[in-house]
Image: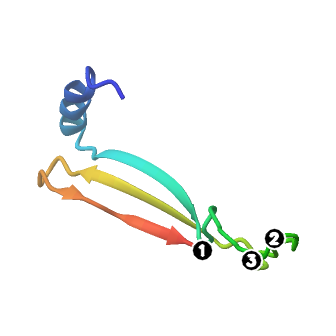
Amino acid sequence: MSTTGLATDRKKAKRRGASVVFIDETGFRLQPVNRRTWAPRGVTPIQRAWGTYDRLSIIGAVTLSPQRQRIGLPFRNLR
């Protein structure tokens, strides 16, 4: 991310009475990707796994209020 226009944007937001918001979103799989198993020589190993792939999505933001000069951290997780 370039920081050259950041100070200008913050001043412009303060002049307009607007908040500055940085948003990011990510997702997690609730089942580990790496697995290990063991079987005696000559026997095919069987790895048991969950039937579904549960996921967790998270979105968060960092906000800067121009009036109070406070930083906020709203977030939401969706399953």
Element at label 2: loop
- First-in-chain label (2 vs 3): 2
Q: Quadrant of the C terminus?
A: bottom right
**Cβ atoms under marks 1 and 3 closer than 8 Å:** no
Element at label 1: loop
Element at label 3: loop
Q: Position of residue 57 (x, y in %)?
A: 55, 64
Cα separation between marks 2 and 3:
22 Å
Q: Position of residue 37 (x, y in %)?
A: 69, 72
Cα separation between marks 1 and 2:
41 Å
Name the residue nearer the viewer: 32 or 78: 32
User: Disc number at residue 79?
Assistant: 1
Q: Residue 22 appears in which quarter of the rendering?
A: top left
Please state which amino acid type lies under the numbered disc 2. Answer: Arg
Compared to 40, does 58 lie above or below? above
Q: Residues within 10 Å of mark 1 (few under 14, many from 20)?
A: few
- First-in-chain label (1 vs 3): 3
Please state which amino acid type lies under the numbered disc 3. Answer: Ala
Report the number of numbered marks: 3
Q: Is residue 42 left or right of residue 29?
A: right
Compared to 19, does 75 lie above or below? below
Q: Which residue is the site of mark 2? A: 41
Residue placed furthest toward the left: 68
Residue placed furthest toward the front: 41
Name the residue nearer the viewer: 65 or 55: 55
Please state which amino acid type lies under the numbered disc 1. Answer: Arg
Q: Which residue is the site of mark 3? A: 49
